Amino acid sequence: MNTQMIVDSVLVLVILLDLAMLAVSRLATCIRLFALQSLLLALLPLAATTGRGEIPGLHEITVAAGALGLKVILLPRILLRIIRTGEIHQEIEPFIGFTASVLVGAGLVIGSFAVTRGLPLPVDRISDFLPPVSAATILVGLLILISRVKAVTQVVGFLVMENGIYLFGLLLLEQTPLLVELGILLDLFVGVFIMAIVVYHIRREFDHMDTHLLDTLKEA
């Protein structure tokens, strides 16, 4: 199996993990699926460089290591800790049911493949699947963000959207300065850290993590 087939297979797995995250109700399982997806994406820059017959340089290694340390190890640990302390382990009544979510997600995937065909893209892209998988991952992340009730799952949706943006960035990996890549990872960490604080305070004040119940708050 050549490198091109490996990259295409990884991108197909990314799509399947997108749909799997829409189908599961257990928060811990959803977080672990995100971590697995992030692991696959973290290795893509190294696979792309190796596929061109080159040795991965500092740029590719740093981007891969940053994504691995932040999105595969650190952020999932933070979210799993929030679940353990909050004693809430399942998404009970999402705004859109799990079966309907998978069907909508499949439609988004099909639409992404149809729309991205006409996009002007770099000639030396690592895979023809990269643009549609990127767009589909962003849209699935947005669907998770707006269709789920638990604050932790909404954070996962935000992170899945970032995975899609990360995939788009791989189209121009060589043209993007390393400091910009590291700045994006830092912004992601700060954003999720703030979200974790918000989730903690929601849990402490209201004894739940259902964000839709915040609509009932009234000014005293």
Image (cartoon, helix red, strand yellow):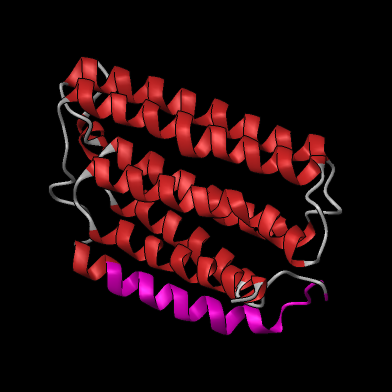
- In the rendering, at what x and y percent does residue 96 appear? 23, 60
The residue shown at (66%, 70%) is 3
Q: Residue 189, located in which quarter of the rendered image? A: top right
Q: Is residue 125 on the magenta stretch?
A: no
In the figure, is residue 28 to the left or right of 138? left
Q: How many labels does the image show?
A: 0
For residue 174, side relative to residue 18 (left or right): right
110 over 102 or under it: above or below: below
Q: Of residues 72 and 85, which is closer to you in this image? A: 72
Decide which of 189, 127 is in the foreground and name it. 127
The prevailing secondary structure element of the residues shown in magenta is helix
Magenta-colored stretch includes residue 122: yes
Task: Locate the N terminus and report the quarter of the image it occupies.
Answer: bottom right
Residue sitting nearer the eye, 61 or 95: 61
- Please tell me which residue is depicted at 42% across the width and 50% down the height of the picture: 36
**Residue 25 shows in this picture:** yes
Residues in magenta? 102-123
